[in-house]
Structures are given as C-alpha cells and as structure tokens.
Amino acid sequence: MSKKNIYNPKSSETVNQRRIISGNPTGLIELTKVKYQWAINLWDMMLANTWFPKEVDMTQDAKDYKLLSSAEKRMYDLVLSQLIFMDSIQTNNIQDNINPFITAPEINVLLARQAFEEALHSSSYAVMVESISENTDEIYNMWRQDATLARKNEYIAQVYMDLEKNPTDENKLLAMFANQALEGIYFYAGFAAMYTLARSGKMLGSAQMIRFIQRDEVTHLLVFQNMINSLKKEQPELFTKSVKDRVYEMFKEAAKLESEWGKHITKSQILGLNDEIIEQYIQYLADDRLSRVGMDKIYNVSNPISWVDGFSSLNEHKSNFFEATVTNYSKGSLSMDDF
C-alpha cells in the first residue's frame, strides 16, 4: 500500500516480474528492456507531439472576443476557468498522487511527461486569458464563485483524495478509472464549445490552442486505458463486481455532471449546442470510454455532433491504437477550411 521506494538496491525484480502497481522496482529507469511496449509507443508519440503555447497566434482572437455576444463571452470565460482548474489539479494529481504508486519505470516516464503536458496546458490558458479576457482575476476565481463548476470540481477531487487517504490496490484502480473519466469526459463540453465558436468563424486561435491540448489529452486517455487493460490481465482479482459497480456509478455521475456543465455554459443561447445535443454527446463519450476498457455501454446513443470528430480521439483512434496513426496537426494557424 505504500509508495514505491525511490532507491531500492536490494530489489532483484526482473523485467517480466514488473507490475503496474505493488511491484518492487529498483528505482532505476531502464528503458532498454521493457514489459509494457505500449508505454514506449506512447512515449514516442508524446515526444513527437511537442508544442509550445506561444506558437499559436492569438492576435485576431483578441479582436474577435470584443465582438462576441454576451452569451458567447460568458461561455468562453467559463470554459477557460474550468479548463484551468482541470489541468491544475491534474498536474499535481499525476505527479504527487498517481505516479508514486506506479511501479513500472516505462509507465513512470509516461506519467512524468503527462504531468509536464498538464502544466503546459496551464501555461496555454494563461496565454489565452492574458491575450483576450477583460478580467483575468475573474477567470481564475470562477471555480470559487460558480456553484455548478464548484460541484463538478469537488466530485472529481474527491476520488483522488480517497486514494491519498487510503492507497489500497482497489483505490489505485478506481483512480485510474477516474483519470479515464477526467481525460475522456470532463474536458469535452468545453472543447466542443470552443470548436463551435470557431465553426462560426470566431476565436480560431483559441480553437487551435484547444486542438493541441486535446491531442495531448488523447494520449493521456490512452495511458490510463492501457494501464487498466494491462492490470486486468495482471491482477484480474481486482476487477470485482463491487469495483465494476463503482465504475459505472462514477461514469454515470461524470456524464451527468458534464452534461449539466455543458448546459450551464451555453444556457440554450449558442447555435448548434442545445441541451439535447450536449447530453447525448457526453453520454456517447462515456460509452466510448467504457467500451475501450471492456466495460458495457450505459446509454447506447450515437454522436450528435460528428463534425467534432476531426478534433477528438474518436476520429483518431477508431481502430486499435497501435494499428492507427494519429493526426499530425501542423503548428500553423487554424482556418475555416479545417471545419
């Protein structure tokens, strides 16, 4: 149940004896011999996807923002505030709460890279806020003041705090599922909102920034999908009916909270994103995330905004991840041709 030792010279663990959790690593990061080849594939992808926020030109967005309707400005500001919170908590959660319990070095480096990317996303939002918003303090404090956002954030944080307080193997597994929900559901109403603005010719720089961020989130989602699927083979006894019931409960609550959030930020005032579309889209994502780890779908609904697929994991990973190629976005400006 304790965290892995940083330095453990008495370990004689071989590569084949490595475990995702509850292993006995030496502390040496040896990547010439690995047990989990999928981790190295993802590591190479993450390195190839390297980008930096200031590469995205926000000049036109600063002008566009002033011309947005009050409903569009409200939505944009709320989305930024929520995304800032999500990546802030993920930076700390990955490096302080998850990685210390992972005992395979090839996965440790993946999570270190993920923590870096989460921090990079926070830097991206800072660029967006400082370039565009009229009140930066208001954006950064919305998580304290908006009740819907606060309720959503508290639920997400509680699962991670459960692991921190009681790091059983079961809670480690549940934290992996919580990360899958966070990376694969909780960001997506905000992403769709940003793309909807861009689809109408507004805030194209912001959409390009989100596009880069979402490409990273796709790999983060794959990290936890592969960890869960590998753990299922390694420690099948953890996947009890009780655990599965808690996972379904977690995903139902995630879909409910994210649907409520999507409806809250749009207030039925954004063309192309009514309440029914938002709810069905989030339910569709929940089903997709569950099916990728061998769980039954809950809602069995289709994607009501399939045009978003060009920016999401659903388009990039229709086939098995290691047989597919991820879209290699250029670092140039986004144009209307992309929609």
Image (cartoon, helix red, strand yellow):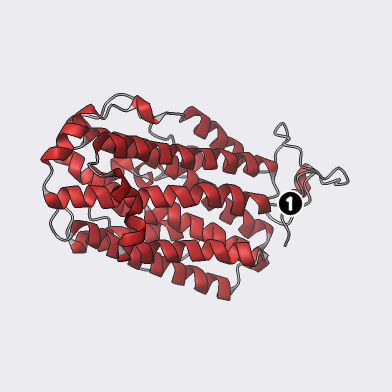
Residue 200 position within the rendered picture, expressed as x and y whole percent measured from the top left: 14, 40
Residue 339 position within the rendered picture, expressed as x and y whole percent measured from the top left: 20, 36
Residue 23 position within the rendered picture, expressed as x and y whole percent measured from the top left: 75, 53
**Can residue 306 be seen in the rendering of this structure?**
no
Residue at the limit of the structure toward the right, as seen here: 10
Where, by quadrant of the figure, is residue 276 drawn?
bottom left
Q: Secondary structure at mark 1?
A: loop
Q: Residue at x 82, y 46 (%)?
A: 13
Where, by quadrant of the figure, is residue 41 drawn?
top right
Q: Which residue is mark 1?
A: 4
The answer to whether 159 is drawn above or below residue 338 in the figure is below
Q: Residue at x 79, y 51 (%)?
A: 24
Q: Is residue 23 found left or right of 303 in the rendered image?
A: right
| Location of the N terminus (image quadrant) | bottom right
- Check disc 1 and give the amino acid type: Lys
Q: Is residue 116 found left or right of 255 in the rendered image?
A: right
Binning the other alpha carbons within 10 Å of mark 1 as few (below 14), some (14 to 19) or many (20 upward) gives many
